[in-house]
Image (tube, rainbow, N blue to C red):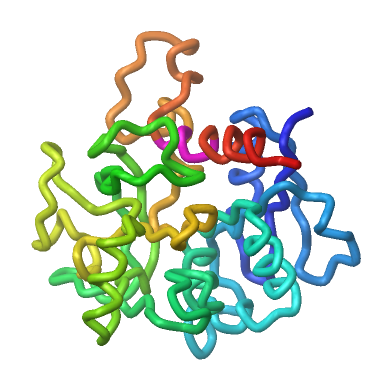
Amino acid sequence: MAPKIAVILFPGTNCENETKLACEAAGMEADIIRWNSKENIDDYDGFILPGGWSYEDRIRAGVISSKDHLMQKIKSAAKKGRPVLGICNGCQILIETGMIPGLKDKVEMALAPNINPFVSGFYCTWVKIKNSTKKKNAFNEFYDENEIIDIPIAHGEGRFTTKDEWILDRLNKNGQIAFSYCDEQGTVDSSFPINPNGSISNIAGISNKEGNVLAMMPHPERAFFKKQLKEKTMNNFGDAMSLAKAAKIFESMREYIKKNKT
């Protein structure tokens, strides 16, 4: 039986349909579940918080959604080992819940406004990230170490930051920095445009210690098929519908559920 994913819709979410499509193309079932749904989410094997501007990013991006009772249910499911993927606004929500980085079960980091020499606020472009951890988690099973991925970003508050140096040290020791912004050769360079938002240590995505929760700012659902890539290399429609490297995040999630489902 195919793993069943709940794609969570808060007011202002706008990437739920393409996220659902990516799940289905990766061999999973997916339902869009509204924040106020009465449906029992215990029936789902995993959860994805897609991108958008939930509650218009009022106060801080993701903070209002993070206080919803539904997030407490998802947090409990994550503690039982179910995978949770937060993309862009979903990433911001996971940071605000304290699920990421999850070192002390409280909010420990922030996603601050971008630092960009040319654009103030929202910035949308293609970037390169790499699988920057040797540690396998629920989302990088099919990536080689330092494998480079073409992927788009679209955010105004995507700069991972913290004032506590011990947190960054712990993330490195734990192998929690899952994806880092890099150049075409895989070099991690903090200068713009390789680091598109000034994120500390070029962080593009962080997992929890256990590896079943991932918060990432880039959009893998928008780089799932080769036809979506900025630099298309297909010669025919069949190749266009083949999967790009970002699809491995969803495929890894699928296999993690199959291996760990009880």
**Which one is nearer the viewer's eye here, 215 or 122?**
215
Residue 13 vertical placement versus 187 (above, below): below
Q: Residue 176: percent from the left, percent from the top? A: 36, 59
Q: Please give the name of the residue rendered at 22% of the width and 81% of the height, measured from the top-left corner.
A: 165
Residue 154 placement (x, y as % from top left):
39, 59
Left or right of 171? Residue 14 is right
* Viewer-side residue, 6 vs 121: 6
Relative to 69, residue 152 above or below: above
Question: 96 left or right of 159?
Answer: right
Q: Which quarter of the figure is the C terminus placed in? A: top right
Residue 99 is situated, as x and y percent measured from the top left of the image, at 53, 71
Over which residues does the magenta segment extend?
A: 246-250
Q: Does the magenta-highlighted stretch encompass residue 164?
A: no
Residue drawn at x 26%, y 53% is 180
Q: What residue is shown at x 60% (from left), y 59% (from top)?
A: 49
Q: Is 193 left, or right, of 204 in this rendering?
A: left
Secondary structure of the magenta portion, mostly? helix
Residue 244 versus residue 128 in the image, above or below: above
Q: Residue furthest right?
A: 38
Which quadrant would the N terminus be assigned to in this image? top right
Please tell me how many numbered marks the rendered image carries.
Answer: 0
Q: Position of residue 252 (x, y in %)?
A: 51, 36
Determine the residue positioned at 29% across, 48% down.
133
